Amino acid sequence: MKAYHHHFIMATLLAVICLGLLTFSSASAQGRMLVKPHIQVDWRQDSNFHRSEKNEKTVHTYTVKPGVELGYTTDKTLMSLNYWLQVYKYDDQDENLADQIDADEFDYTAHNAQARFQTQATRRLLVGVDDTFLKTRDPASADANSNAVDRFKYTLNRFSPHMTYKFGEKFGLGLKYTNLNTDYSDDAPGEGEDSVENRGTVNWYYNFTPKTSFNLDYQYWERDYDKNTVDYDSSQVMVNVKHQFNYLTFGAGAGYHNREFDKAVPSGDIDQFVWKVSVLGQNPPDAARIPKSSVYVSFGSNLNDSGTGNTYFTSTRLDARLTYLIMEKINCTLSGYYQNSEYETSSREDDRWLVSLAGDYLINEYFTVGLAGGLEERDSNQAGKDFDNEYVMIRAKFNYDLGSR
């Protein structure tokens, strides 16, 4: 069994053991238990399942997604385990064209497990560990700035112990170590490449006022690939400021990213200015369930991290999500992203965007049914990389709180 499996099992066992210990602790230390099973069923139609420039094919996707959320909190300690699996079944609606295969060849079962444990060890010291395990075909899970359209199956495990020390009421220091393992089911040439990333993060923060804060974030990481992709070391420093105004939090950050490769690559070593601005909030800010409205906007520029085949690019990306609750029953969501990918290793440049509109009808506090649709498009200066895809989705979700107390 590989190291990342050990990490996840250890974190899960830790959460379960601590959960048991706290359940039987004395009355003075009793906390709140959370047990939430849930299941979601989806149907989706894509007009261009393979994201192909010319050979478009319509495919229906059927998914079933059961899961459970477990948690226990006290005044000083938080533990949680959130797990779900999702069964994907694909059904061709058109005949295969050149170089296409049956969509059901991509059938699989995805897994997502997130374990967290943190405790206020002393009045000033907070310690914890997070572990996330994924089995997926979604390339965006391997890199938030992904520009890929492949469906290679892989597992990903992110293990992160961390601590935060408060020197006073206004300032403190955070330390975190992250081990990231990416393992492709079939890592033949052109099918993805296994990698290991080790990252250290130091974050110094200062709260000027209850609504305005500053932090200096430094990260250093090395990424080692299993086969032909060149290993690299990256270091990044950013200065960030946040300010809260009413129910909105505005953020801005700027810094410098340096990436050095172990061997010569077409781009050479990369040095660049990086930045990010954001707006986040909901109304009312303390909504117990679905807020009346919410907003999330993030706009920034940086390098992608997962560069199998040395395909690194500068990503300038805008993400946005707006929600509005109508008559306490219909939750409307407008969301999307735009990403410009300017490749460091070639003259390729892509513009990719997605916009979607969704509405979820809240039948009661347990059942939700929804309808969503959207359009995704990529325009590239490299032949064969353009595509557009229209999709529509119907979904139903059941979510029940069995044991919160």
Image: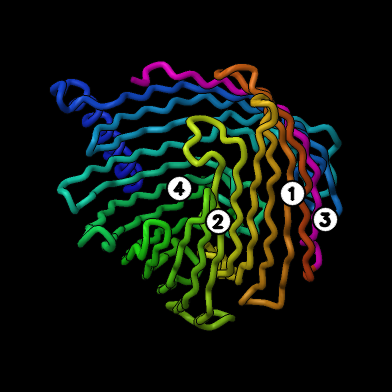
Distance between the Cα atoms at labels 3 and 2? Answer: 23 Å
- SS state under label 2: loop
Q: Which residue is mark 3?
A: 53
Distance between the Cα atoms at labels 3 and 4? Answer: 29 Å
- SS state under label 4: strand
Q: Is residue 279 left or right of residue 100?
A: left
In the image, residue 252 sits, relative to residue 298, either above or below, namely below
**Residue stretch rendered in magenta on the structure:** 383-405
Residue 144 bears which disc, if any?
Answer: 2
Provide residue 102's location: percent of width, then percent of height.
74, 37
Q: Residue at x 47, y 37 (%)?
A: 286
Q: Residue at x 44, y 19 (%)?
A: 401
Q: Nearer the viewer, residue 302 or 183?
A: 302
- SS state under label 1: strand
Tell me whether the residue at label 1 lies in contact with that at label 4, contact meaning CB atoms closer than 8 angstroms: no
Q: Nearer the viewer, residue 359 or 229?
A: 359
Q: Which residue is mark 4?
A: 156
Viewer can see residue 395: no
